[in-house]
Image (cartoon, helix red, strand yellow):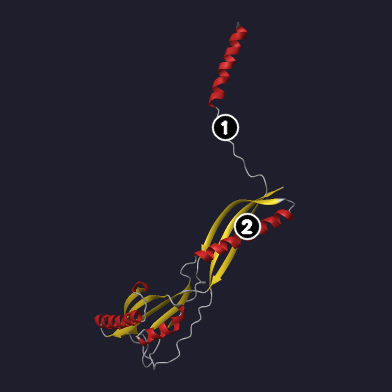
Amino acid sequence: MKSALALMALGAAALPVAAIAQTSVTIAETAPVVTLNVTETVEAAPDIATVGTGVQTRAPTAQQAMTDNAAKMDSLIGALTKAGIARKDIQTSGINLNAQYDYTNRDGVEAGPRFLGYEASNQLSVKLRDVKRVGSLLDTMVKAGATNINGPSFSVNDPAPMLAQARVTALKSAKTQADFYAQAAGFRSARLLSISESNSGGNPPMPMMQSARFKVEAASDVPTPVEPGQVGSSVTLSVQYALER
């Protein structure tokens, strides 16, 4: 009887343990893992050029400087639209008004700053969708009164096909490298574990923007020469492969 009770007690004590036990199993990757960072770039001719341009004016008063500037900017925008640039591709990028002073010492005698007037500037960012016309459009800007020009910078309007091609090339390159490491280390193959991507599409390395001021002279039959060259779309893949025997 005591033996039976003892067995029942042992059974009862064991049941709850079996009923509430929870098992968490994590299977870690036991094979060696190689991590590769691969960058591929696909180049193409650009189809977009972006140019910064604008006008600067000086006058004795702030109001006059802004009024004169507005008239010149209207003339510049009118010339751009007449040349076929859509309004959606013309964007104001900055308007500034500043007092101007002359800090030069006169006759070797120190003197306080001499007030010269006010300078107003209005800057535009213009997108040109025909890169073959960039040179002639730059000349059009100057003839219309532009006093400064920045750029151009070139890009591709739709870099998606270039990025897709770069992805394929990058992944093939990564696989080739992983297989090399596998064979060199005495393994049979490399199995893909993960992929992460970063990309930059359709743009050249950002150049140092240079500003040029122009004096309008006699018209020339030769447009300003502009060479668009090539722009690249780059994809960088970070991939991991498990080396298997």
59, 71: nearer the viewer: 71
How many numbered circles are shown? 2
Residue 142: x and y in percent read 38, 86
245, 162: nearer the viewer: 162
Residue 193: x and y in percent read 61, 50
96, 236: nearer the viewer: 236
Looking at the rendered structure, the secondary structure element under dot 2 is: strand
Pointer 2 or 1: first along the chain: 1
Relative horizontal placement of residue 10, taking residue 127 as reference (left or right): right
Location of residue 105 with respect to 19 vertically, above or below: below
| Label 2, residues with CA under 10 Å away: few <14, some 14-19, many ≥20 | some
Looking at the rendered structure, the secondary structure element under dot 1 is: loop
211, 200: nearer the viewer: 200
Name the mark on residue 23: 1
Residue farthest top in this picture: 1
Q: Examine the rendering and report whether any part of residue 209 can be seen.
A: no
Residue 231: x and y in percent read 52, 72
The amino acid pointed to by label 1 is Thr
Q: Would you say the residues marked 2 and 1 are in contact, meaning their CB atoms lie under 8 Å apart?
A: no
Kindly report the distance in space between the C-alpha atoms of the residues bearing marks 2 and 1: 35 Å
The residue labelled by disc 2 is: 36
Q: Examine the rendering and report whether any part of residue 130 can be seen.
A: yes
Residue drawn at x 60%, y 7% as measured from the top left: 2
Q: In which quarter of the image is the N terminus?
A: top right
Relative horizontal placement of residue 53, taking residue 61 as reference (left or right): right
Residue drawn at x 25%, y 83% as measured from the top left: 64
Q: In which quarter of the image is residue 3?
A: top right
Location of residue 189 with respect to 143 vertically, above or below: above
| Label 1, residues with CA under 10 Å away: few <14, some 14-19, many ≥20 | few
Residue 25: x and y in percent read 59, 36
Q: Quadrant of residue 177?
A: bottom right
The amino acid pointed to by label 2 is Leu
